[in-house]
Image (cartoon, grey):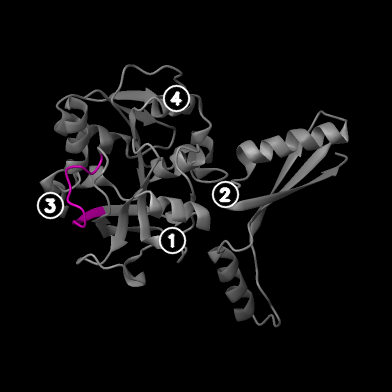
Amino acid sequence: MLAKVHVTLKNGVLDPQGKAVRNALSGLGFAGIGEVRQGKLIEIELAETDRAKAKRDVEAMCRKLLANTVIEDFTIEFAES
Amino acid sequence: MRAAVIVFPGSNCDRDAAVALTKIVGRAPAMIWHRDTELPKLDLIVVPGGFSYGDYLRSGAMAARSPVMREVIKRAEAGVAVLGICNGFQILTEAGLLPGALMRNAALKFICRPVHLRVETTATAFTRRYKKGQVVTFPIAHGEGNYFAAPEVMKRLEGEDRVAFRYTSPDGRIDPAHNPNGSLGAIAGILNERRNVLGLMPHPERASDPLLGFGGTGAAMFEGLIEAVAA
């Protein structure tokens, strides 16, 4: 099974990189761009086949290492690898 | 004073710290590799600056989970002084020894220059040799020094006199023009609840000898620690 972890800055935490990307997009002539937030995608191959167990494991990974929960939120998706 | 400097792959201020400690303490610190799981008897642990583990994932994230840090956390909890400088500060927040986080500089640029800092508290071994309100000059060299903490954490830090240094103008005024990285409350360094752990982005070890400039005002931090150990 493949876990896809999205890590993003929490709402309310300033994202200067997102702002710079937004300005660059506007500078390229793309109109109607609202806020841009930048995050990261982490893909993890798992031997575990039980979805519920895998979810618990990956949540623990997020809390222990993958996300800094002081400033970041995470979401987890699963796909068959 | 028995001191140690932790060395991670990618640390680059470990030797600066060792040179400063050797000169001020009068004997060389133990250099402890990140895979070590035992520490000698110590009065001070320095977590130095640099780019531990290449700043992979987040700056300080990997180092905070390395084997030696479990031991550093134990010693900190036992009251040993722990000083995190620059990447060391990032590591201490990632390890949970200090609250908050250090984010990308507001202007997205790596900044390497001297800054003015106001000493906000002298109620800790780290700053007992300074005067409250004294302005010192230390260099900074970081891309992620933008201190952030939730409002309730900020309130506690302020209420418990745990802000050790703030970025200010040369005459000690707080204004956005003298906050190099966008840190909340112009915070440059903070203490833990027990006041034996200090993390700061500026480099006192690079200002610890008059030959390095800045009046050598960084030395007083190490002198204060020596004094506290002797007391």
Mark 2 sits on what residue?
A70
Which tag, 1 or 4, sits closer to the chain's start? 4
Gap in Å between the C-alphas at discs 4 and 3? 35 Å
Q: Position of residue B131 (x, y in %)?
A: 17, 51
Q: Is residue A18 left or right of residue B209?
A: right
Q: Is residue B126 above or below residue B156?
A: above
Are labels 1 and 4 on one chain?
A: yes
The residue that disc 3 covers is B215
Residue at image position (85%, 35%) is A52
Could you classify mark 1 by the number of other residues whose Cα lies within 10 Å: few (under 14), some (14-19), or many (20 or more)? some
> How far apart are the two marked residues, 2 and 4, measured between alpha carbons?
22 Å
For disc 2, the chain is A
Closer to the eye: label 2 or 3: 2
Q: Which mark is residue B209?
A: none
Callouts 2 and 4 in the same chain: no
Q: Which residue is located at x 25 percent, y 40 percent? A: B126
Q: Earlier in the sequence, mark 1 or mark 3?
A: 1
* Residue at figure coordinates x 46%, y 25% from the top left: B68
Q: Residue at x 81, y 34 (%)?
A: A54
The three-letter amino acid code for the residue at tag 3 is Gly
**Mark toward the viewer: 1 or 3:** 1
Q: CA distance from mark 2 to mark 3?
A: 37 Å
* Residue type for callout 2: Val
For the residues carrying marks 4 and 3, which lies nearer the camera in this image? 4
Pointer 4 with pointer 3, Cβ within 8 A: no
Q: Which residue is mark 1?
A: B184
Q: Dot 4 corresponds to which residue?
A: B74
Q: Is residue B122 left or right of residue B156?
A: left
Q: Which quadrant holds residue B28?
A: top left
